[in-house]
Image (tube, rainbow, N blue to C red):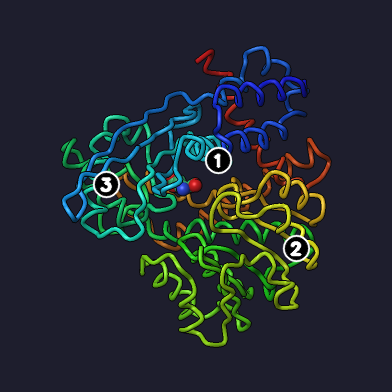
Amino acid sequence: MANYVERVIELCKKNNPGELEFHQTVEEVLTSLAPVMDANPQYEECALLERLVEPERGVTFRVVWVDDEGKVQVNKGYRYQFNSAIGPYKGGLRFAPNVYPGIIKFLGFEQIFKNSLTGLPIGGGKGGSDFDPNGKSDAEVMRFCQAFMTELYRHIGPDTDVPAGDLGVGAREIGYLFGQYKRITDRFDGGVLTGKGIPYGGLLGRTEATGFGIVWYAEEMLKANGEEIKDKVVAISGFGNVSWGTAWQLQRLGAKLVTISGPDGYIYDPDGISTDEKVAYLLELRASGKNICAPYAEKFPNAKFYAGKKPWGVQQDEGIKVDMFIPCAMQNDVHMEHAQQIVDGGCKFYCEGANMPTTNDALQFLMEKCVAVGPAKAANAGGVACSCIEMGQNSGHTVFQHEDVYAQLHQIMKNIYNACAEAGEKYYGNKNALVQGANIAGFERVAQAMMAQGLV
Ligand code: 2IT
């Protein structure tokens, strides 16, 4: 049956040539599922994995807009609707210059399992564009978003497909996208997009939900191994939305965050990025639109800026021990040599925050050497879980309170952790086999739904 998994991985590579990130995710997920295939031959008989790796639908489209100089710009737009077995397609939109089908498909495929892990009724999808919002004016971003939605609107709906933000798509972009959807359709379909602003249907707590959830998941992982998060020294990458939410929750739980990073290098703050002022400053840095983190060290002079370096070597650079690393920036941020640095420095816990931040070989190495590794599709599922709560708020024509959202999110993260640990224990004899456990627990629910719904 392991043969079955290998065959589908090969098939997927052949059918999606050159889409390396997609190959990587499919390989990582399907490999974990081998023991489930052994125990359930009916899955092979109905070609379940072949169906899973093929999106139900994908659209690519032209996005035409005019920049501030009056020049006509043309970008590519995408929406891959991967799996609707357990609910409407749900997943973010990514606007970044490196976006191509391999990135949107890896994200869409991951989203199937992540959304299933939340226990909520949401299927998997993802979209985006190769548009780069960095350095664009507000008016340019608005015109781009309007042009993008002028095509996308016909493929989405509150019970069909519900996009949200991802890299390069925040509250501002969601606002422009929503405005254009409403203008075209003449419907206030609040639940057609999530991550909306608070005045028009957004969920209190959605902005920090991903980061809060990551830290709550990491807390469970530590607890299960007899450790507490309070006073732990933590290093993260990135300085965007996810990093900010993670920093804030680490602060709330009394951990000491010592790094953030950007494309320009990384910041080491020996005093900890642990005050309200410092956490709030991360938002300012991001809002500057310059995509650099160096100004942090000017604002807080005790901090040091390491130009051109990643934070994975901070233990060696500073002669300190880090208890947990949490990559929060982007895919394939942690390679084999970085994993080696993390382990050599004495770190025992690693929890992914961003989507697929670790290459497959580095992930394998960390799983062997660390006490526990938290996988992104479980740890960062709090964001999309709150998106689903936002959909419920909108369809119920109501407003949920902050504290209720936090309480629900906290419980969801505990449930997700337990589902991963139980599946790890059941199929791999190890409660710390969370990477495999997340894939299996996410898969099982989708598989059961697909089996029940016949050959579609
Ligand atoms: O990767 C993710 O889960 C997201 N970008 C959020 C998806 C969502 O629909 O809230």
Q: Dot 3: few (<14), some (14–19), or many (≥20) neighbours within 10 Å?
A: many
N-terminal-most mark, 3 or 2: 3
Picture residue at 76% right of the left edge, 20% below the top: 3
Residue 113 rendering spot, x and y as whole percentages = 58, 37
Image height of 127 relative to 312, above or below: above
- The image quarter containing residue 282 is bottom left
Spatial separation of the CA atoms under disc 1 and disc 3 = 31 Å
User: Which disc number belongs to residue 341?
Assistant: 2
Q: How many marks?
A: 3
Which residue is identified by label 3? 145
Query: Which residue occupies the foreground of this view, 335 or 107?
Result: 335
Give amino acid for label 2.
Gln
The amino acid type of the residue labelled 3 equals Cys
Q: Residue at x 33, y 54 (%)?
A: 202
Q: Quadrant of the N terminus?
A: top right
Q: Relative to 179, say whether 310 is above or below.
A: below
